[in-house]
Each structure stands twice: as C-alpha cells, then as structure tokens.
Image: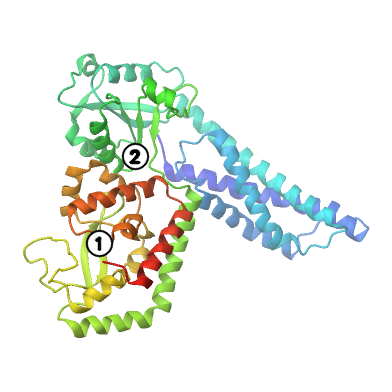
C-alpha cells in the first residue's frame, strides 16, 4: 500500500542526512587541507561558528531547493535516470549559491583553492544525496515491480483493443504498477471477453463519479485514436480530475514520435501530461504572483481608495462585485472585481456585456477601458485561486455553452485562471459565446507553451493596453 506522506518523509529525511554527512566530511577536508595550506601547520578539526551555521541552515536550504525544483512531487513514480539529472542540476545550482554565500570570504592560499573547495563540496553533496535517493527509489521500484505497490487503474474502452491491453498488463512479469480495477465503455462498443475478466464499472458518462468512488489514480484510454472528437471530449473531461492519463498508441503515433516509453518492461503508452510548466518555473510563477499582489496592494492603495470613492458616489450598491467562477481542476471560487454595472444588471439571468451596454455605470465604462475593474483580483491571486497570467475564468452557465461548441475548453482547467491572458490581450472582454470560443484558441496555445518568458510578454502587452486605455 502507498503512504504518500511517509514516502515523502523518507526522501526529505534522506536529504537532511545527506546534507549533514557531507557537511561533516567537508569540514574535515577544509580544516585538514585548505586551512593547513593557508596557515602552514596542521589545523585541528573544530566545530566553529561557520560550521554550526552550516549544520543548522544547509538541511533546510537543500530541502527547499529540492521542493522548489519539484523533486518531492509524484513521489512513487520516479525514474532513476531522471532523478540523477535532477539531483545533479539541483546540487550544482545550490553549490554555486552557497559558494557566494559561505565560501567566498574563506582565507585560501591561492584562488585555485576556491575552485577546489567548491568542487569538493559539490561532489560530497551530490554523491551523498543521490546515493540515499537511489536506495529509496530502487527499493520503491522493486516493490512496484513485485506488485506490492500499485496504482488503481481504469481502462476506457471495452473492445478488442481494451482486452489486449488488459492481457498485456496482467501478463507482465515485471509490473509497471497498474492494478486494473475495471473498465467503462461507450454504448457502441461490445465488451465481449473483457467483461468476463474484469468488472464493467458503468457507462462512460459516469466516469468522473467512478474515478472518485474507486480511488482511480491512472486512466488508460483504449479506444480508436482516429475518433478525434470522442478523444477530445474524453481527455477534456478526465483532465479536470488531476489524474495520470495514458493512451494506447497506434503506428502513426509511434512513427510521429509521440510515444515516450517510461518503463522498459511496461506496455508502450502515450502519456497525456497535465504538467504544462516545469515545477521550478511554477514555483517562481507563484512567488512572482504573491510579490505582484503585495506590490499592488501597497503601492496602489491610494488608487484603490480613489476608485472606491468614485464607485460609491457614482451609483448605489456595493463597491466590490463578487461572483462564482470555475477555476483549476473545475473547482468553484469567488472572484472579486470593482463593480462596473448596476446592481440589478442580471435580474433576467446571466448576460455578457458589450461596449454599448446600458447596464454599465458611468464609472464602469471608464474602469473597463483601463482594466481597473480587475484590480481586486490581486486578492484572488494572493490567496491562490488565481494567477496574474492565465486563462480568464468563466461562469458555469457560459462554460456549458462553450463546451457544446468546443469540448477542449476544459483543458484550460489544467492551470489557474488569470487576471490577464493571451486571449484577453487579443480580444478584451468577450461579448458573446462565439467570441469566447474564438478567444479560446489563444488560451489553449498559452497552456501548451506556458513559460515565465511568455508570462512576462503577456504582462507587458497588458500594461500597454492599460496605459493606452484600449480595454473594451
């Protein structure tokens, strides 16, 4: 059985132990070699102030850096080769940081000893860290291969393709970790022999409930890849559940280079990866989100106060407008905006606004022109519901209409919604569902190409839009 908390603790404890052991050996090396060269006599090994600081600070530093790089994510599905590269990169970066923080003021006999010191520190930290990680990962891998650790798996499909997949999984001498709980299938599929081997868990339209009920961790799609519309809808629905999605490739997929084999012994599958940005960039993005929000609330507080008074004097009603929107993984949250419309603007039901909308207040037109109505959403960013840059969140009422025209809209729920987006920069506020669908292609492009550089670019053009008053 898996215990995610315990497994994470093992890795963190190993990293702390590696840090302490490598620091002890490095102190000995520095005293007996580096400092002996400086002072010309055999320096005794003593725990000085700098050594004590290292013992207290370095374990936290290395654990933070590993967390920042995403090492402690998906703790049971680690590749030893990728782990080697990730550990090397993390220790190399950390060693450079520590060189300037701790070692640069050391007394040395020559500059070459600076390089020798940091190189020795890097080697000790890298080999001790990777050794402990390798032991834990190898032990976990053996338990998975022996089927003592598994991932509850659901097969989508009931035809010959699904049956062959199940037979391949069950015949694996060395397990890849998939424990098939059952299958779901479409009405036009005939389960045939598969239903004699595993349980039919229900119809495809109940797949979300089935995933929740049976604790499904992985889904393998075994329907025809040529059925693009069906695949598109299915992946969009499953993507909201934050589970690992895999597909059986056909020969076109293999020849096109879409198949990435993660296990030598397992069935080759296409992994539909929901992680669209490296973990270290996600961490930096979150730090920048918090920094921007704090900056906005502190520096722009006089502007907030002015807008508060302006809205209050312009029309009756609350200054802050609150509304339910759909965020990451399809979760509902409350969005905050400066009110730009009359209080009873939606007495006849949900409706989008346009440039000539008579429901808008006088101050509201001005606020929208400069995009100032979005400023309270920095609070949403601060508490983690939103990001500064990301697809604009919509209401369920309009999402249902968009999905009828573009099922892939749900792919946007992979990421946090944003105050501004590529689609927002291109189109501004959508006035109808058709414009929402048109804007969608830019948001899809964004999540497939997410990077800090793209965020900065979108942020720059948003700032230009605000300064030029080109919002609509």
User: Where in the figure is residue 280, as x and y percent of width and height?
Assistant: 50, 51
Whether residue 386 is situated above or below residue 369 in the rendered picture:
above
Question: Can residue 385 be seen by looking at this rendering?
Answer: no
The colour style of the image is: rainbow
Q: Which of 228 and 83 is in front in this view?
A: 228
State the residue at coordinates (40%, 73%): 296
Could you tell whether 112 is left or right of 83 in the image? right
Residue at the spot x=66%, y=44% of the render? 126
Q: What element carries label 1?
A: loop
- Any mark on residue 429, and which? 1
Q: Which residue lies furthest to the left in this view?
A: 348
Disc 2 to disc 1, how far (Cα)? Answer: 32 Å
Q: In which quarter of the image is residue 171?
A: top left
How far across and down, in percent of the image, does residue 283 sit? 47, 55
Closer to the N terminus: mark 2 or mark 1? 2
Residue 163 sits in quarter = top left
Front residue of this view, candidates 80 and 2: 80
Q: State the residue position of label 2.
A: 243
Image quarter of the C terminus: bottom left
Residue 164 appears in the picture as rendered: yes
Look at 23% across and 39% down and name the residue there.
208
Name the residue rendered at 47%, 27% in the picture: 261
Picture quarter with the N terminus: top left
């Amino acid at each position: 059985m898996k215990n995610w908390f315990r497994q994470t603790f093992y890795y963190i404890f190993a990293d702390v132990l590696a840090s302490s052991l490598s620091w002890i050996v490095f102190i000995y090396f520095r005293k007996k070699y580096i400092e002996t060269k400086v002072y010309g006599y055999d320096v005794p090994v003593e725990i000085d102030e700098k050594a004590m600081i290292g013992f207290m600070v370095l374990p936290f530093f290395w654990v933070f850096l590993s967390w920042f790089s995403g090492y402690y994510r998906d703790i049971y599905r680690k590749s030893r080769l990728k782990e080697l590269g990730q550990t090397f990169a993390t220790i190399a970066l950390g060693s450079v940081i520590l060189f300037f923080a701790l070692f640069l003021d050391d007394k040395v006999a020559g500059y070459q000893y600076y390089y020798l010191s940091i190189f020795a520190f890097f080697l000790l930290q890298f080999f001790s860290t990777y050794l402990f990680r390798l032991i834990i990962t190898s032990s976990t891998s053996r338990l998975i291969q022996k089927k003592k650790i598994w991932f509850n798996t659901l097969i989508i499909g009931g035809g010959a393709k699904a049956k062959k997949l199940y037979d391949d999984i069950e015949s694996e001498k060395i397990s890849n970790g998939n424990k098939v709980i059952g299958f779901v299938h479409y009405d036009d599929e005939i389960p045939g022999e598969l239903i004699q081997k595993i349980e039919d868990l229900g119809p495809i339209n109940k797949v979300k409930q089935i995933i929740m009920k049976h604790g499904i961790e992985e889904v393998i799609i075994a329907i025809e890849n040529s059925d693009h519309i069906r695949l598109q809808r299915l992946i969009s629905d499953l993507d909201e559940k934050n589970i690992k999605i895999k597909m059986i490739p056909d020969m076109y997929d293999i020849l096109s280079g879409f198949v990435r084999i993660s296990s030598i012994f397992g069935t080759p599958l296409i992994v539909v990866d929901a992680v669209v940005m490296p973990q270290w960039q996600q961490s930096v993005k979150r730090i920048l989100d918090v920094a921007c929000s704090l900056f906005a609330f502190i520096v722009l507080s006089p502007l907030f106060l002015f807008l508060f008074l302006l809205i209050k004097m312009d029309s009756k009603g609350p200054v802050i407008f609150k509304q339910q929107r759909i965020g990451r993984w399809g979760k509902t949250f409350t969005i905050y905006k400066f009110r730009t419309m009359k209080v009873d603007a939606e007495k006849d039901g949900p409706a989008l606004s346009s440039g000539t909308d008579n429901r808008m207040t006088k101050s509201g037109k001005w606020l929208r022109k400069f995009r100032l109505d979005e400023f309270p959403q920095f609070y949403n960013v601060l508490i983690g519901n939103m990001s500064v840059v990301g697809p604009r969140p919509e209401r369920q009422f309009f999402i249902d209409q968009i999905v009828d025209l573009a099922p892939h809209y749900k792919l946007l729920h992979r990421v946090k919604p944003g105050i501004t987006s590529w689609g927002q920069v291109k189109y501004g506020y959508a006035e109808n569902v058709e414009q929402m669908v048109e804007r969608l292609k830019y948001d899809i492009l964004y999540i497939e190409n997410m990077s800090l550089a793209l965020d900065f670019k979108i942020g720059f053009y948003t700032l230009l839009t605000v300064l030029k008053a080109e919002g609509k």
